[in-house]
Amino acid sequence: MELSLETILNAYVIPWGTKIVMALLVFIVGRWIAKLLVKALQKVMTKGNVDQMLVSFLGNIAYSVLLAVIVLAALEQLGVNTTSALAILGAAGLAVGLALKDSLTSFAAGVMLIIFRPFKLGDFVEAGGEAGVVEEIRIFHTMLKTGDNREVTMPNAQIYSGTIINYSARSTRRIDLVIGIGYDDDVKKARDLINQVLEADATVLKDPSPTVMVLELGASSVDFAVRPWVKSGDYWTTRAALLEAIKDAFDKEGVSIPYPQQDIHLIQQSAS
């Protein structure tokens, strides 16, 4: 039986054409609205001083979710059974989630690091068994540059689940030195020499003032606790300079820096 052109138009072309046009309208208008909503969300987060990396990430997530809803709405206009499609996507999502469990844990940890910000780019931190300068914070991992110029990439889950020490969080830092002198040396003289060295170093802060006190009467030395404060950026250079200067001052003034010693007593017994 041959169908007339009018029958074909009324039965197939016009209904399907209408559905396709409606589906395209839903997709185009929906995507436009989704972009507006995401921009508004990002603007609100930016005004709330949310980290820009998190703003971008959440914006992408929100846009992807809205776009998925729009695609489903457009498919419904074409008469596609979206219930079956959702079931298939849900099963696939569950399988992918189980397979990428560790990655999802690092993803969640990355979001927490961005939200709570225990460190920022450029900070010197110790985390996950490594110490270095934070170069980049990504969703799944963080990149550090160590002091010997190695690049370390660590999963965010490893960082967030352990202790994080941020050496750059505060503007000042205390140097803790233990300086030993011999038991035959003058304690007051040694303390005065150490104080002179501290006063001569311009990087040692006056406030808080440095502390020099007898820490312990050790097995072979009288140990001083020397605790000056410096700016965080001056820590290592000042520490090295102070050790050298204290050694030079002691050598010039005849104050000894002992090393562990043992006295051996030999007892000679006469033959019977």
Image (tube, grey):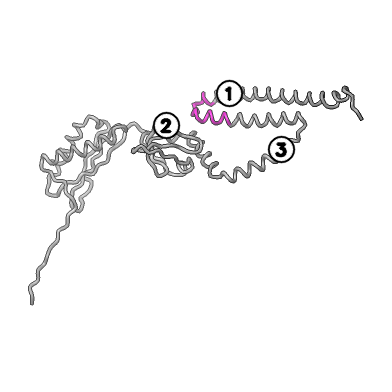
Q: Of tags 2 and 3, which is closer to the observer?
A: 3
Residue topped by disc 3: 85
Q: Would you say residue 40 sits in the magenta stretch?
A: no
Q: Residue furthest right?
A: 1
Within 10 Å of disc 1 (Cα), the crowding (few <14, some 14-19, many 20+) is some
Secondary structure of the residue carrying tag 2 is: loop
Secondary structure of the residue carrying tag 1 is: helix
Cα–Cα gap, marks 1 and 3: 29 Å
Q: Would you say residue 58 sits in the magenta stretch?
A: yes
| CB under 8 Å between discs 2 and 1 | no
Where residue 71 sits in the image (x, y, percent)? 69, 30
Seen in the image, is 123 located left or right of residue 66?
left
Where residue 68 sits in the image (x, y, percent)? 66, 32
Seen in the image, is 54 located left or right of residue 255?
right
Where residue 25 sits in the image (x, y, percent)? 72, 22
Where residue 86 sits in the image (x, y, percent)? 70, 38
Any mark on residue 121, and which? 2
Any mark on residue 39, and which? 1
Within 10 Å of disc 2 (Cα), the crowding (few <14, some 14-19, many 20+) is few
- Mark 2 or 1 closer to N-term? 1
Tell me which amino acid carries mark 3.
Ala
Seen in the image, is 183 located left or right of residue 6?
left
Quarter of the image for the C terminus: give it. bottom left
Within 10 Å of disc 3 (Cα), the crowding (few <14, some 14-19, many 20+) is few
Q: Residue at x 21, y 32 (%)?
A: 201
From the viewer's side, name the closer residue of 259 and 98.
Answer: 98
Secondary structure of the residue carrying tag 3 is: helix
Magenta-colored span:
45-60
